[in-house]
Amino acid sequence: MKDKFELVSKYSPQGDQPAAIEMLVNGIKEGKEMQTLLGATGTGKTFTVSNVIQQINKPTLVIAHNKTLAGQLYSEFKEFFPNNAVEYFVSYYDYYQPEAYVPSTDTFIEKDASINDEIDKLRHSATSSLFERKDVIIIASVSCIYGLGSPEEYREMVVSLRTGMEMDRNALLHRLVDIQYERNDIAFQRGTFRVRGDVVEIFPASRDEHCVRVEFFGDEIDRIREVDALTGEITGEREHIAIFPASHFVTREEKMKIAIQNIELELEERLKGLREDEKLLEAQRLEQRTRYDLEMMREMGFCSGIENYSRHLTLRPAGATPYTLIDYFPEDFLLVVDESHVTLSQIRGMFNGDQARKQVLVDHGFRLPSAKDNRPLRFEEFEKKVHQSVFVSATPGPYELEHTPEMVQQIIRPTGLLDPTIEVRPIEGQIDDMIGEIQDRVKKNERVLITTLTKKMSEDLTDYLKEIGIKVQYLHSEVKTLERIEIIRELRMGKYDVLVGINLLREGLDIPEVSLVTILDADKEGFLRSERSLIQTMGRAARNANG
């Protein structure tokens, strides 16, 4: 089991980095609960944090406030730690419409979501790494404070196979079905297994290239091999393999029976209450939905929206703190909150929004009251679960200022670059002025970011720039997670010279080729025009000598 972090980089810490690393490491060793790294844009905060992780040598959770930034941090940490487990844990929904009810128009909106298979694989890879090794860094978005199944249950349900072990082939098949693997002899994909005589092939939920071939001789495991799922080529022999569950919400059969009884009791009680209040439609709706889910749980061991019953499945009392990714970490892990001035306020706001939506569903008979316990953590619960944290930001917010009055400062860039020059120009003729500037930068093979106030304005501007022959791309919230990362890569490669967007051009997007950031309507009050936001947006040009 590997348990040492090994930082690989041709650079050594420069500028303010060595002092910042030493202060943070000493602070953690002295047992300080919170520290803030106040680092100007482009001073190499990720490299500083990587050095701290290597010296402290604890499993680390890095939280970013959006998927694009998490994706960028993931690739940076993966470069710094190629021999350690760097994992990515974000919400696996490409598109997510939570179930909701609008009483005024009597409209129920079904939950509708498309799950990204690649991201689901990465989530499973993250949780299984935490149980298999110590040298783990997980880059997560704020979705890591949402409920996940019980880590104890997840660990106990792991199917451990060794060569020479006595085990009946059919017993293995039953165990695989218990942990939500499906038998599929034709379309072999993640989370399935197939059987050919004495050979069972399993496709683990945390991988997409290799599957595991288990060969039996009578009632004994004869050999275990790793096989390339596409070509069928054998890539290695294994003495031992652990197969982790295909869902984070797995429950043992005996626990499932107790959970079903408890759900039925809650259902009876709730129906009685609704009928007494003469809410007959709501009562009928609730009974129909819940009975259907219970039937699925009895027969299949799961149902659609099973997370809404997570409190019963983990046998927790009402109002108890849900299990989250943080519970999969050992006690002494390190938390790094990137761009903490945004991320912390996001964590704080999650709980209230979730509860308001669920309350409406409960009131109108779409869900049992216990569904409200499938929720994100409250901020106080989040604070309790974390013992040591480092906040990273160029513009720390009120929480960091209050809890870490002495900040670790990193102002001098290792590259020696100065802050970008700032010019305020009149609004008349701003577009022509901007086009002139863009053409200047394109001649020098540099890139430009333009940030506008509204989506409509971004679209119109992009169309206009395309018409006059500028290579431009528009980045907005409807672009899928992995596509955003691709667009940013293409900007760096020179497929585009200009990127137009609203707020995706702010914290932590590291594009050294960018030498000009244009903020249209910077004088207007509103979203993304506050002092902190403007500093962050301007910082996007801080990585270029001509910025």
Image (spheres, rainbow, N blue to C red):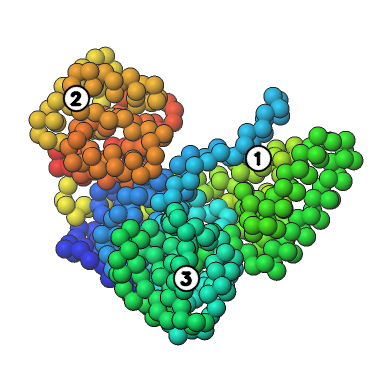
Image coords of residue 65 (percent x, y): 43, 47
Residue 391 - label: none
Give the residue at x 54% y 48%.
348
Q: State whether residue 56 is above or below residue 452.
A: below
**Real-space CA distance between mark 3 and mark 1, rounded to the nearest whole angstrom:** 54 Å
Q: Determine crowd level at label 3: few under 14, some 14-19, many 20+ residues with C-alpha closer than 10 A.
A: few
> Residue 532's spot in the image, x, y percent?
38, 39
Residue 382 picture location, percent across and down: 55, 57
Instruction: Of the two numbered discs 3 and 1 on the same chain, state the one appearing first in sequence.
Output: 3
What amino acid type should be assigned to the residue bearing mark 1?
A: Ala
For mark 2, give the secondary structure: loop
C-alpha gap between disc 3 and disc 2:
62 Å
Lower position in the chain sequence, tag 3 or tag 2: 3
Which is more toward the observer, 331 or 202? Answer: 202
- The residue wearing badge 2 is 470
Which sits in the foreground, 178 or 220?
A: 220
Amino acid on which disc 3 is placed: Gly
Report the quarter where the C terminus lies: top left
Q: Which mark is nearer the camera, 3 or 2?
A: 3
**How many callouts does the rendering have?**
3
| Disc 1 target residue | 356
Give whichever of 144, 514 is nearer the camera: 144
| Residue depicted at 41% across the width and 70% down the height | 213
Q: Nearer the viewer, mark 1 or mark 2?
A: 2
Mark 1, secondary structure of its residue: helix
Q: Earlier in the sequence, mark 1 or mark 2?
A: 1
Q: Is residue 401 left or right of residue 517?
A: right
